[in-house]
Amino acid sequence: MSEARSEVRKATDASTESNVVPREVWMNEAWGPPPRSRDVAVESKSDTTQELPAIKIENGNKTGKVSDEFKEKTEKIINALPEDVKQLLRKLDIKIVAAPGFDVPAPPGALGVLDDRTNTVTISERAHQGKPEEVLSATAYHEVGHALDGVFLRESNDAKFQKALEADRKALSLAMKRSLVDYMSKDEDAYAESFAESFAYRQVERTGGKIPDQFLKLFQHTITYMRKKYP
């Protein structure tokens, strides 16, 4: 099995009401083993806030190149991240690519992929066609979250993060737990998915966007943790 991780994001009508949580834009499906931890020397946060030149993402892979508009839009989203996060991306040599598709295995409908063998995040233009920019932002930040977590942070294994997540899990109804099955197990992969998703929406919020109401409702403790971790 390939050592790649991908996320399938499916948007649903926000007005649809159900006793079971719908698989919205923030729902993901894990693909492949969790990223491996690497030892990387990184300066303290106080030393990483200096504004540096903009991050440039690569255009294309084996599947071809993307439009200038999509590349520029994705680049703008990445550069909207706070300087401390962008500094980590630079220091950890995490590469971000905009491409028509993926050159690693991914399930149908995948919007973004992290290949932890090469520390490469790939965002698909083809998969984002017809979707709002908020979906592109969430996808990009989710993959960045996976990359940072796997290469350096390992925050998904942190006791404080897991305690916050468990508090949210405990409050869910049985129907919700079944709907959110990808986040419910107590293995490393489920914690990594939960971290990446909550990281993504905290970054959406930090860059002026809005966290989906339903995610806020279901993961209050986790988002509170993220807000403290990334003020």
Image (cartoon, rainbow, N blue to C red):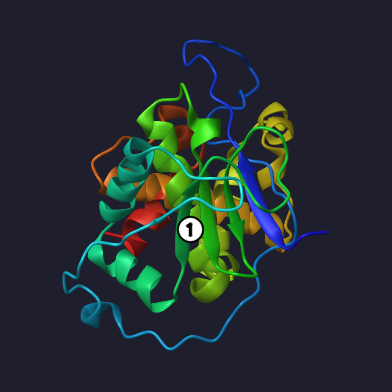
Q: Position of residue 191 (x, y in %)?
A: 63, 57
Instruction: Give the percent coordinates (x, y) of residue 185.
Output: 74, 51
- Expressed as whole percent of the image width and height from the top left, the position of residue 78 reads 33, 53
Q: Quadrant of the C terminus?
A: bottom left
In the displayed structure, 173 sits above or below 87; it is: above
SS category of the residue bearing label 1 = helix
Q: Residue at x 62, y 66 (%)?
A: 116
Q: Residue at x 44, y 74 (%)?
A: 93
Q: Residue furthest right?
A: 1
Q: Where residue 28 sits: x, y (%)?
A: 62, 40
Total numbered labels: 1
**Which residue is label 1 attached to?**
145
Please tell me which residue is depicted at 31% across the width and 46% down the height of the picture. Answer: 77
Is 98 or 186 nearer to us in this picture? 98
Please tell me which residue lies in front, 205 or 101: 101
Dot 1 surroundings within 10 Å: few (below 14), some, or many (20 or more)?
many
Q: What amino acid is at disc 1? A: Gly
Above or below residue 18? Residue 43 is below
Left or right of 1, for residue 37: left
Farthest residue, direction left: 51
| Foreground of the two, 146 or 154 | 146
Q: Work out whether residue 103 can be spotted.
A: yes
Side (left or right) of 183 relative to 80: right
Q: Is residue 152 left or right of residue 45?
A: right
Judge whether 42 appears above or below 86 on screen. below
Residue depicted at 69% across the width and 63% down the height: 34
Task: Work out which quarter of the rendered image holds the N terminus and state it.
Answer: bottom right
Regarding residue 146, the answer to whether it shows in the image is no
